[in-house]
Image (cartoon, grey):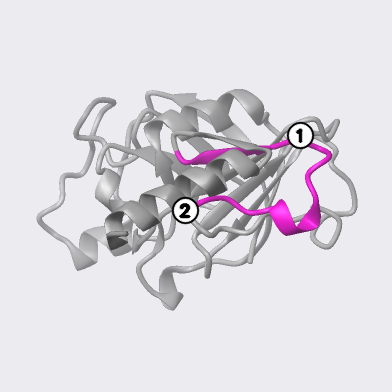
Amino acid sequence: MKRRTFLAAGASLAATTLDAQQFNGAVEIEKDVSASQRRNMSSFRTLEWQPYFDNLRNGAILVDISSRALHYWSEDQSVYKLYPTSVPLSEDLTKRGRTRVTRKVEGPSWRPTPAMRERNPEWPEFVGPGPDNPLGTHALYLSWTYYRIHGTHDTRKIGRRSSNGCIGLYNEQISELFALSKVGTQVLLI
């Protein structure tokens, strides 16, 4: 059997044995999945919320910088999502800790921070909504100044260290997370 045929057959078998459905890279996990099946095809591992949050009031978002994954749990525990993300370019741009969603914007505009402008003086001072906007189609503003969870039109950034501090998702996925989350959703970056 050729290697390519073997790999395709293995992926097909794995996809049929998991009780997870994959939508645009996100994984929706059924409640009765065994511990050995709690993974998706891209090797992100699913997590339980209890080690990270005291409760799920307003829902919860966990961003794991090292695995470049965002986990979302709904307040009533009926929805769990796992998304691949882009993360900050370097440790000095990375912020960790607890915050919350303070504002939700569909079609966000963008202004580079003073530090970004210093590093990249050729960047524009303002970019309105649209395909040239680095925040993509939706943005969840956090209680930390300048930090957001947002979409991106540049899909090459997802799964990489590529941001100036924010967490990026595919536009389809930030749209879904935007609908699921609310102002007040708790966020933890680890």
Q: Which residue is mark 1?
A: 74
Whether residue 142 sits left or right of residue 174 in the image: it is right
Residue 18 percent location from the top left of the image: 64, 44
Q: Is residue 172 above or below residue 64?
A: above
Q: Is residue 53 above or below residue 77?
A: below
Residue 134: name its quadrant: top left
Q: Residue furthest bottom?
A: 91
Whether residue 12 sits left or right of residue 143 in the image: it is left
| Element on which disc 1 rests | loop
Residue at 86%, 56% (x, y): give it. Answer: 50
Sooner in the amino-acid sequence: mark 1 or mark 2: 2
Image quarter where the N terminus lies is bottom left
> Which residue is more in the foreground, 94 or 74?
74
Q: Which residue is mark 2?
A: 10
| Element on which disc 2 rests | helix
Q: Amino acid at mark 1?
A: Ser
